[in-house]
Image (cartoon, helix red, strand yellow):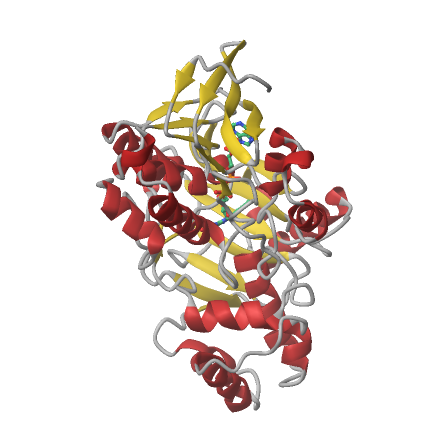
Amino acid sequence: MDGFVADERFDAVVIGAGAGGLCAAARLAKAGYSTLLIEARDRLGGRASTEEIDGFRVNTGAIALELGGVFEETFAEVGAPLDIRLPEPPAAFYLNGKVVDVSRGGWGTLLGGLTKHTARILDTFGEARRGNLPDGRQSTQDWLNGLTRNKTVHAIFRNLCAAIFACNADELPARAFLTYFTRKGAFKRFGFCPRGTIGVWEDLAAAARAHGADIRLSTPAQAIAVDGGRVRGVLVSENGRERRIAAGIVVSNAGPKHTVALAGAAHFPSEYVDLVSTRLKPAANIVINFASRDPLLHAPGLVTFGRTRRLCNMANLTATCPELAPEGWHLYVAYAVPKPAIGEFDADAEIAEAMTDLHEQIPGFGSAKLLSVRVMRDDWPAQRSLSGYDLPRQTGVGGLWCVGDAVKDYGNGGTQACAETAKLVVDEIGATHPPSRLN
Ligand SMILES: Cc1cc2nc3c(=O)[nH]c(=O)nc-3n(C[C@H](O)[C@H](O)[C@H](O)COP(=O)(O)OP(=O)(O)OC[C@H]3O[C@@H](n4cnc5c(N)ncnc54)[C@H](O)[C@@H]3O)c2cc1C
């Protein structure tokens, strides 16, 4: 893109309207930057969006939106309502066909009935809270092996790894697991959006527009223009026509790999290009949306399973948000994580394992209405990089940053982590490229 002659000019262009991109665009607009957010798809939310199937509002990714962190703070800061409803209790375990509510007693209540080594496990959580964490090489499974061999405890920890991080216990560093459960929100308080998760993004986009952001759907970025080590703008395709948008700030929510492809590897420091090709570990999961006229689960929020093959957790969405389904129907979503979750697997065989689990765990599943089964992997994964294997948000190109779940802070996950990446990037932009100097 030599001799960049612009059709339009903005202070900042954000590529991608996923959790990270929307939070970044809303914050940039609020901070006074003229901001363009472009999204390749025809809807907001990226991997945390919603579609309509037979009158059901079916989520394609995230459902549980966590309170008490940067995600909630972002909505408050830009003046967007946070339209979520909190199940009570929010989370429980589903062991041997029974719902086990540990919302009051925590880990002690859960593990106390399962293993005589509970005190040992709780001690290591205490140590982690004091900052004594295993190094990043030991897996969660190896760490737990040193504390107990109890199969149900191992199954629960595997399913927690799967539910939160979309991986198996032998794939996740124990350091990341313990960081999350002792220092981050750990999904203690969360809610579901009664319009489907896309509802919260619609509200965030409306707030961003109210601060002056221009948001264009079905407008893919085709290239990022870089010259002399600095970003110059973005080439987009709008209604089938190429447009050149000049901007000194580009925030990419498209993931580091796609960002490098858009700008061209030659423009990045070679260490960064190496990191992009060697460090990223996309983590996969399988999402099964189904509905029933009879209730199938007597817990209003999320349940995590014990001994299963692949199934890890399940949400009872209509218990809190009945408007997600036509009248008289109950809507559920179950998640399974393949083995391995990081690397090659046979999708059909993994789906079959998950289905067997659902038949075993949920009486009545056999007569449920199956709405969709999706495998999230490769370029459209559950997590763009496994926790503990994140890239820096800086790309080495002046004015170009990444946000989203490949550039999370250590041990964080999900939309909360993405919102945090947006805050960190916009804070850095504020410190280095104040809006007044751009105009
Ligand atoms: C099944 C499943 C369940 C999950 N459950 C939860 C949960 O309950 N709670 C939670 O917090 N998290 C959950 N997560 C994780 C969460 O959904 C993701 O971490 C998060 O949505 C990722 O957001 P992101 O900012 O990385 O952007 P993405 O969702 O990756 O969005 C990036 C956007 O960029 C767009 N884009 C890409 N290339 C271009 C281009 N060239 N031009 C323009 N646009 C482009 C894409 O179309 C996309 O919309 C779940 C994930 C999955 C898959």
Total numbered badges shown on the rendered structure: 0
At x 30% / y 51%, what residue is drawn? 72
- Residue at 52% in and 35% down: 230
Please give left or right for residue 29 compared with residue 183 in the image.
left
* Extreme residue toward the front, this view: 228
Estimate the x, y position of residue 112 in percent, counting from the top left.
Answer: 49, 85
Which image quadrant is residue 327 in?
Answer: top left
**Camera-side residue: 9 or 19?**
9
The quadrant in which the C terminus is found is top left
Image check: 127 left or right of 356? left
**If the image is split into quadrants, where does the N terminus sit?**
top right
Rendered location of residue 124, percent (x, y): 52, 84
Point 37% across, 29% down: residue: 11
Q: Position of residue 69 (x, y in %)?
A: 34, 58
**In the depicted structure, whether residue 189 falls above or below residue 415:** below
Q: Is residue 383 above or below residue 210?
A: below
In this view, the residue in front, 155 or 345, is: 345
State whether residue 277 appears in this view: yes
In x, y percent, where is residue 366? 60, 46
Foreground of the two, 125 or 405: 405
Q: Nearer the viewer, residue 346 or 385?
A: 385
Q: Residue drawn at (57%, 86%), measured in percent from left and top?
A: 115
